[in-house]
Amino acid sequence: MNTHIRFSNTNFASLDELLDQKIIDLNTKSAEVTQSGPPGQFHIEPVSDAAPSANSETAASAFDMPFLNLDPYNLEGKDNLPDGQLSEGPQGNITSGVESSSGSGEQQVNFELEMEDYTFRSEAGRLDIMALTEERTTEIKTMNFNGQEVAIEYQSGLAYEFEGNFYDDQFREMYIEMTAEVGTTIQTEAFDADGNPILTSFGYEQVLEVTGEAVDYGIEEFSMEFEFVIEFERNDFGMYEMTFSVTFEGEIVNMDGTEREFLFEDEMMFLFSDLDQVNFDQMPQGFYDEIARFAAQMGDAWDAFGSVSDQLEAVLLQLQEEGYYQAWDDADQGLNDPFDFNLPSTDPFA
């Protein structure tokens, strides 16, 4: 008979005591390492009575989710990536290119990179890349205002997909499928008396989905999904109505048949009188706690997550150095945001 344990953002029952002890052990271990620790290290500081905000120093140093910083143009936290050798398989192939289009009231510049059948070897292990893709999208929409074409909407997006196998330094195998996406939309469909654009709506979404098998780690299958959404718009009274939602959901099926389910979800609504008051520092501590519980149950397999993430970051940086992003650079890295609104950081782990 399978055992099911489900966690949510409610108070935890006594069945959680074992996991709580594992988190305490994980906290103690992480306090002994720096933020730029070994590949795959999951940094968790002891939880204080006051929950840190998403933009606070405590939260920033405490949580390193894998697969959220694959972008080779963002070098933050990549000082200690593994040195390795990238080798081509029998069906190895790498392609990249830019597509652009322009029509009435709309412009697009997009980039796509595809890699198949490559292997990356480092001290951390071997990563067999069955398929890895990256897509970058930028779009500007315009309208005619007082005889001039002016921007009214900007969209940008970055998406990754990966499928492959990882073998750690103990030759344990993990199969992973991963999808990571982030996107932003800014709309300015109104103007003030001087003709300056007014921000009418804003949207930000970050999604991570990971599934796989880790039999050598004692896990038959696992899944993890993270979604973070911010949306706000200006109402008829000139106020900004903001909706903030975050979800973390995980499932682990162990080889002994036991199952663990993890869930945290929260949605909050705020009202701001003007744009200067808008902030995104309300990330609930329970969200981070649930990730820590999932990581504790994954055990060494969570460290393997980190190793796969680090190796993918290293691979993409190597592809950039070898010129596979040159077409994107020649296209000025897409369309720039035409607006200069001073918005706070939207990264929940920044």
Image (spheres, helix red, strand yellow):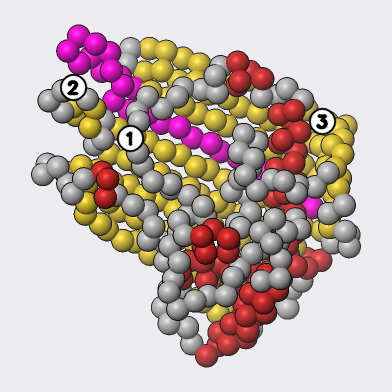
Magenta residues? 141-166
Depicted 163 relative to depicted 248: above or below: above
142 on left or right of 75: left
State the SS at label 3: strand
Residue at horizontal 73 percent and vertical 59 percent from the top: 37
Q: Amino acid at mark 3?
A: Gly
Q: Which label's residue is closer to the chain start, 3 or 2?
A: 3
Q: Is residue 126 magenta?
A: no
Residue at horizontal 45 percent and vertical 39 percent from the top: 183
Q: Amino acid at mark 1?
A: Phe
| Gap in angstroms between the C-alphas marked 3 and 2 | 54 Å
| Gap in angstroms between the C-alphas marked 3 and 1 | 44 Å
Task: Identify the residue position indicated by label 2 in the image.
Answer: 195
Q: Quadrant of the N terminus?
A: bottom right
Residue 313, quarter of picture: top right
Residue at horizontal 20 percent and vertical 16 percent from the top: 145
Task: Identify the residue position indicated by label 1 in the image.
Answer: 341
Residue 172 visible here:
yes
Residue 249 placed where, x, y %?
Answer: 51, 64
Residue at horizontal 32 percent and vertical 40 percent from the top: 202
130 on left or right of 76: right
